[in-house]
C-alpha cells in the first residue's frame, strides 16, 4: 500500500499500488475508445456490436431523481441491457450523445435541445462493459456545461 501526503503534511494510505495506478493510466485511452464504440453501436441500434461489447452479466442502472424522490431501476444480462440501451440511446434529431469524462473516467453526456439530460458512466471488466449507470437528474444537471 502506498501513501500520499495531504496539504497539512500527514500521510494516508491510498489503497493502490504503483502498478494499479500505472494500469489505470495505460488503460484510459482504451476505455475512451471502447466507450466511443459502445455509443456508436447503441445509437445505430447495432445489436451485434453491442452484444460483443457487453459482459454477459452486464447491469444497466437507470437512476432518476426528482425533487423529493429518487428511484433506480436495474436490468441484468445482455438481452435486457441491449433493449434498454438501444431504446434510450437511439439517434434522434434533437438529441446528442457525446463522450465526456464522468467522475474522471470515460463516459457520455446526453443533451436535448442544448440542455444536459443524462450522464452515462461505463465500468469495465477487462475489455467488456460490465456496468452502465445512467443518471437522469434534471435538477442536478441544470448546471452542467451547455453544448
Image: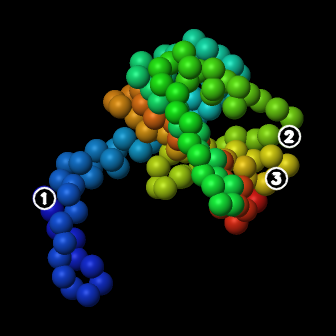
What residue does disc 3 label? 114
Vertical order, 36 against 48 (above or below)? below
Reading the image, the residue beneath label 2 is: 94
Which residue lies most toward the front here? 68
The answer to whether 139 appears left or right of 1 in the picture is: right
Q: CA distance from mark 1 to mark 2?
A: 48 Å
Q: From what the image shows, is residue 134 above or below residue 91? A: below
Instruction: Please tell me how crowded label 3 is: few (under 14), some (14-19), or many (20+) other residues with Cα within 10 Å.
Output: few
For the N terminus, give its image quadrant. bottom left
Which sits in the foreground, 62 or 4? 62
Please name the residue shown 56% across and 20% down the image: 80
Image side of residue 65 versus residue 35, left or right: right
**Mark positioned earlier in the residue sequence (3 or 1):** 1
Q: Residue at x 49, y 55 (%)?
A: 103
Q: Which residue is mark 1?
A: 1
Q: Earlier in the sequence, mark 3 or mark 2?
A: 2
- The local secondary structure at tag 2 comes to loop
Q: Position of residue 99 (x, y in %)?
A: 61, 44
Amino acid at each position: 500500500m502506498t501513501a500520499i501526503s495531504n496539504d497539512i503534511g500527514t500521510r494516508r494510505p491510498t489503497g493502490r499500488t504503483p502498478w494499479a495506478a500505472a494500469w489505470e493510466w495505460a488503460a484510459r485511452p482504451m476505455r475512451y475508445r471502447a466507450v466511443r464504440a459502445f455509443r456508436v453501436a447503441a445509437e445505430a441500434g447495432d445489436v451485434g456490436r453491442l452484444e460483443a461489447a457487453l459482459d454477459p452479466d452486464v447491469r444497466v442502472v437507470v437512476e432518476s431523481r426528482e425533487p423529493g424522490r429518487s428511484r433506480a431501476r436495474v436490468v441484468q444480462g445482455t438481452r435486457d441491457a441491449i433493449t434498454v440501451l438501444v431504446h434510450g440511446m437511439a439517434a434522434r434529431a434533437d438529441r446528442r450523445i457525446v463522450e465526456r469524462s464522468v467522475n474522471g473516467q470515460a463516459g457520455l453526456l446526453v443533451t436535448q435541445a442544448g440542455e444536459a439530460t443524462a450522464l452515462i458512466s461505463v465500468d469495465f471488466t477487462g475489455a467488456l462493459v460490465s456496468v452502465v449507470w445512467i443518471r437522469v437528474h434534471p435538477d442536478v444537471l441544470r448546471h452542467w456545461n451547455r453544448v
